[in-house]
Amino acid sequence: MFAATSFKNKSVAVFGLARSGISCALALAAGGAKVFAWDDSEPSVEKAKSEGVPIINLHTIDFKTLDSLVLSPGVPLTHPEPHWTVVKAKQAGIEIIGDTEAFAREVSGSGAKIVAITGTNGKSTTTALIGHVLKFAGLDVDVGGNIGLAVFNLRPPTQDRIYVLELSSFQIDLMPGLKPDVGILTNLTPDHLDRHGTMENYAAVKARMFSYAGDGTALVSVDDEWCAAIADVTPQVSRVSVVKEVLHGICAPEGILKDKHHGQCVAEIDLRQMPSLKGRHNWQNACMAYGAARALGVSVDVIAAAMHSFPGLAHRMQQVAVVNGVPFVNDSKATNADAAEKALVSFDHIYWIAGGISKSGGIEPLAAYFPKIKRAYLIGAAAENFAQTLQGKVDYVMCETLERAVKAAAQDAQAGSVVLLSPACASFDQYKNFEVRGDAFVELVSHLPHAQMSQGGNG
């Protein structure tokens, strides 16, 4: 945690005392602000108090005596209705911001840079990949925001430090001064409409990433209508597509990344050779990472080498090992059929480990990919239902446990195939969460004879 000195001698209310709220409150206090922190949850208040956060019930405060309200991104700003602190702040005429806005003010003028990534899907992998590429290139990089560390738990801003931040729509909504050096929008599909009211409002919040772009780099996908509309009104935008060629921007419709300037291809990277960047959705992540790295001066050759060494985000199509020439892939985060589809479409000759607590519809929506599956290994509560769906279409083995499934798949899999844990199910029948399930998979694979574990393969 470092001090937020731009709020020195100001009175600041902080509401919401989870991870980011606590670190922000401490940063503000360390920087000389008079802090009034509160949460409607008594356990959260007690935890914050134990960490030294100045606690006061905001119900008792006259908000006209305050300069700012720092609101947790999880607290409603507009929909379904404004939180009571928001109402009081608006009545008092004070600014309502988030910890990321306070952080950005500390960065301003320091010589540090911000790469900001947002979108409905793909944010986390894109953020992790950009951080990996920049670190591989020898740059001074911190990664955080909506992934990993809260912003005030990153290192303090210094000349040439680069912050790679995943930002949710909630965070952007509380970040009126957002002006990234590189701004990235991956895609937009209906999400969080309970918080934004309409898809139009949701898209408008995401578009604020580019409202003050100035001399910064804007990378916007044009593969959905909402993002394409934002690209159309964003100055000096670099368009990104993985479904079609672009005249000016970055594209990879066939898995070969092309950097195109006014119709001319100036650089290429074959993404099909990258172990942890399988599938069209990962090609988009790679295009965004390429654009960010090039904007920050990294050479094409270094970017390609970095992408090849990227271990993948834990539990998201993460290649964790190669055993006798067969990759073992941890996609434990695929807790429903839609998520598992991304993995199944990305591989051929699949030895598939699936099961757990099934979501509505089971795996019937995945029928188009059944011909790719050499054998399925069914585990957990959904095994019987999945077996009925696969009957006569896919060879399957009832394994019950992940341990049995891993051992059986390792014995069966042949060179040119892949062993894929992509359960299409929640984990709660056998594991606390998908992370614990994924970690268990990695541990089991590590004990297989001749297992060559990937760098970062333990998540």
Image (cartoon, grey):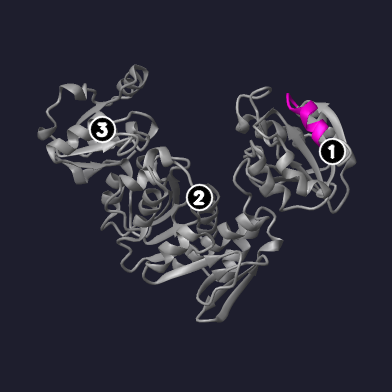
Q: Which residues are magenta?
A: 380-389
Q: Secondary structure at mark 1?
A: helix
Q: Is residue 119 visible?
A: yes
**Closer to the N terminus: mark 3 or mark 2?**
3
Q: Earlier in the sequence, mark 3 or mark 1?
A: 3
Q: Mark 1 Cα within 10 Å, few/some/many (few <14, many 20+)?
A: many
N-terminal of the two: label 2 or label 1?
2
Q: CA distance from mark 3 to mark 2?
A: 31 Å
- Kind of residue at badge 3: Val
Does residue 352 appear left or right of residue 24 in this picture?
Answer: right
Q: Which mark is residue 14?
A: 3
For residue 434, which quarter of the picture?
top right
Residue occupied by mark 1? 409
Quadrant holding the C terminus: top right
Element assignment for label 3:
strand
Q: Amino acid at mark 1?
A: Ala
Residue 98 position within the rendered picture, expressed as x and y whole percent measured from the top left: 30, 41
Image coords of residue 370 (percent x, y)? 80, 46
Magenta-colored stretch includes residue 386: yes
Q: CA distance from mark 3 to mark 1?
A: 51 Å
According to the image, label 2 marks what residue?
A: 189
Query: Can residue 33 be seen by looking at this rendering?
Result: no
Residue at the spot x=36%, y=66% of the render? Answer: 216
In this rendered view, identify the residue nearer to me: 208 or 3. 208
Question: Tag 2: Cα neighbours inside 10 Å, few (<14), some, or many (≥20)?
Answer: some
Which amino acid is tagged 2? Thr
Q: Quadrant of the N terminus?
A: top left
Q: Nearer the viewer, residue 328 or 287?
A: 287
